[in-house]
Amino acid sequence: MNIQALINTASALVAGDKGLLAMDESTPTCNKRFAALGIPQDEEMRRDYRALLITTPGLSAGISGAILSDETIRQRTKEGTSFVNVLIDSGILPGIKVDLGLKDMAEHPGEKITEGLDGLRERLMEYAELGARFAKWRAVFTIGEGTPSQSCIETNAQDLARYAALCQEVGLVPVVEPEVLMDGAHTLEQCSAVTEEVLHEVFRHLYAQSVILEAIILKPNMVLPGLACSEQDSANEIADATVTCLLQAVPVAVPGIAFLSGGQPAELATLRLNAMSVRCKSRLPWALAFSFARALQQPALEIWAGQATQVVAAQSALIHRIRCNQAARRGDYHSTDEHS
Ligand code: 13P
């Protein structure tokens, strides 16, 4: 393991005002999003859509790394260039989602465990050979009656740490993604308490597994009220709650925190990231960045809707969202930017 190379990669992922493009939806999830828009759900359409994303002119001005899936990392454009080479040639670091998805946790109704540790070392070695420079593993936690349980938090945290250690061993930067879900009627305060507890447990296990914190990226949820909560807090309240929570639990050695969007409307995710930059950036030890899937892609996907004639319009919608989120990283975003 070349520690300095890992640290350099982690720093590059959150440098300046750039962010990560999460385009690692599993085949079933991608198909579900296609089905909702009447797009045929086959490998060719998934390939065409992902090719649209990575060949967007000017993508690398705002995107430092793109997270691919197992299908996508092996694909080529219609012209025959591998997706990995398209990214590398444009100066974007290729990444790969390596967890194998969520399974019901035994004896814990309503809770999920992330699978994928069996054979992970060998899979990581193959992905590194294919050109990946970083990886991603997502665990989820549901706030509800008695959840998340201590055992769900501990097991997922330990698995995240084992994954992260294996990544670093083969020279991949681990993106560590513990997601407290927005589903439910919980308050901002409840989300904050659970997120803080989860993060403490994740960092306890990362330490126990000797993970080099300077060479990871944390990908957490923002601290948000549940979708069904009657009180929906302002962007400033969300920004303050999120930053306060992260300051309690994330060591200063971590170079960057790149949020997932988690189903927030795209413009709100940007507004909330901007509020964090405006109110807190000068006193934070780590970079605050974005690693959105839906909040970057959804407008572009809806415009494309499977039509070859819509590729250019979809690409400009993607670039628009990226530019808005770059502005949010700088604390320069205004809702009026949406309509300029
Ligand atoms: P969303 O931004 O759509 O939550 O996706 C991020 C991600 O990578 C999910 O694992």
Image (cartoon, rainbow, N blue to C red):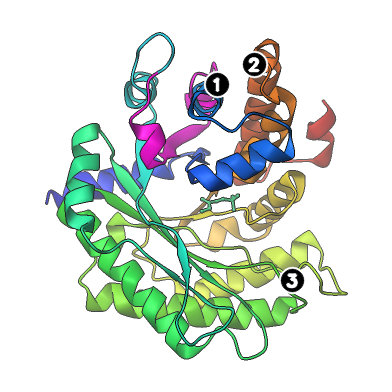
Q: Can you say whether 8 is above or below 180 in the image?
A: above
- Residue 327 appears in which quarter of the rendering? top right
The tag on residue 52 is 1
Of the two numbered discs 1 and 2 on the same chain, state the one appearing first in sequence: 1
Seen in the image, is 91 located left or right of residue 181?
A: left
Q: Is residue 55 magenta?
A: yes
Query: Percent position (x, y) of residue 128?
Result: 21, 40
Q: Can you say whether 247 is above or below 89 in the image?
A: below
Q: Is mark 1 within 8 Å of ligand 1?
A: no
**Which residues lie in the magenta part?**
52-76
Secondary structure under tag 2 reads: helix
Secondary structure under tag 3 reads: loop
The answer to whether residue 25 is seen in the rendering is no
Q: Are marks 1 and 3 in contact (CB under 8 Å)?
A: no
Give the amino acid type for the residue marked by disc 2 in the picture.
Val
Q: Is mark 3 within 8 Å of ligand 1?
A: no
The tag on residue 226 is 3
Query: Percent position (x, y) of residue 41?
Result: 59, 33
Give the amino acid type for the residue marked by disc 1 in the picture.
Leu
Crowd around label 1: few <14 · some 14–19 · many ≥20 (10 Å): many
Cα gap from disc 2 to disc 3, whole angstroms: 35 Å
Of the two numbered discs 2 and 3 on the same chain, state the one appearing first in sequence: 3
Q: Which quadrant, please, contains the C terminus? A: top right
Seen in the image, is 19 located left or right of residue 338?
A: left
The answer to whether residue 120 is seen in the rendering is yes
Q: Which residue is mark 2?
A: 311
